[in-house]
Amino acid sequence: MNARAAANAAVTARFKPGDAVTVRRAYPPGHIRTPWYIRGHSGTVVHALGPFPNPEELAYNRPGLPAQPLYRVRFRQGAVWPDYAGNPADTLDIEIYQHWLEAESDAAR
Amino acid sequence: MTDSHPHDHHDHAHPHRHPPRPDTDDTLGHFQIMEIAVRELLIGKGIITPAEIQRAIEAMDARGEALGAKIVARAWTDPAFKTRLIADGTEAVRDFGVDMGTTRLFVVENTPTVHNMVVCTLCSCYPRMVLGLPPDWYKSRNYRRRAVREPRAVLTEFGIVIPDGVVIRVHDSTADMRYLVLPQRPAGTDDWSAERLAKLINRDAMIGVALARQP
């Protein structure tokens, strides 16, 4: 799968830098690239990286299409770890595929 | 290789040593046996040759921190290159003959107000194409667990204290990007050549657990 073919078979990007997003709180089996510790947390999209074949499919030797938009999402350390001791502005920057993200307003309870 | 002396090329003091992980070469695990079986099948069926495997191993072993150091030194001395490197690292490192393969290089710059460090909590994703093989500690559960949870404590154990006012960004390398930290250029090196600057840059500074050496 080259980048051009992946782009042609990609899901439409829903988010752009600056958007507030929440990581889905889901625990499916399989090859998941969304770290457990960040599920359910909210952050801000800082980079839209373009479409990439879905690793959850690639892991089973399937083509990974449609490709999923990938984002770098920035989380405040203090929001992820309530007892975080460092600078309140410290961040975790994590790559997350679009199907793991919800707009923060969608996710608000 | 780096098992027993992961930091013996450093010239700064470390308050601790990472204990080496025990050798496990007395028994083969499931995936080691699987690798040998698949490799022997591929060779037996004439799909790859032992010489090709040897060449791939040699190519991986030939990549190391010296390549990353050259890239950083050029960014320090060539503002146009630095701009390209940060905008699209994958494309910029082609100048050095580096092909990132299916991954992309994402360069994060340390400044007086931001310090970046890299971890892969899920496994051991690492910018091998520019830094070679990762050190054992990078793959350890302790580093992976603690780097995202208490980065300042981890950095202190590596021998650097980041002032409270400096923001630490931890990059969890979970997907298709591979991260290279562009360290701050040491003061007093204004008239230095890229070749001379490269000697101040070590692997750990490009992972973000050390600073460039002071001249």
Image (cartoon, coloured by chain):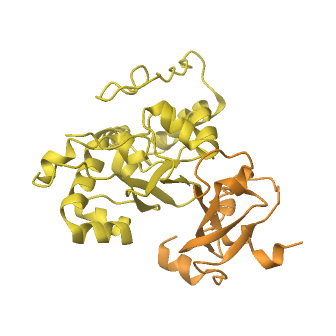
Chain colours: A orange, B yellow
Q: Is residue B171 left or right of residue A35?
A: left
> In percent of the image, x 74 and y 51: which residue is there?
A36
> In percent of the image, x 57 and y 78: which residue is there?
A17
* Residue A52, position as x, y percentages in the image: 57, 70
Name the outermost residue toward the right.
Answer: A109
* Residue A81, position as x, y percentages in the image: 72, 49
How many numbered markers are drawn?
0
> In percent of the image, x 33 and y 24: which residue is there?
B8
Q: Is residue B196 left or right of residue A35?
A: left
Q: Closer to the camera, A34 or B101?
A: A34
Name the outermost residue toward the top.
Answer: B26
Residue A18 visible (yes or no): yes
Q: Is residue B140 left or right of residue B197?
A: right
Residue B136 visible (yes or no): no
Q: Quadrant of residue B82?
A: bottom left
* Residue B150, position as x, y percentages in the image: 61, 41
* Residue A1, position as x, y percentages in the image: 52, 70
Please say if B176 is above or below B28. below
Q: Is residue B1 left or right of residue A42?
A: left
Q: Closer to the camera, A45 or B104?
A: A45
Name the image quarter holding the C terminus of chain A: bottom right
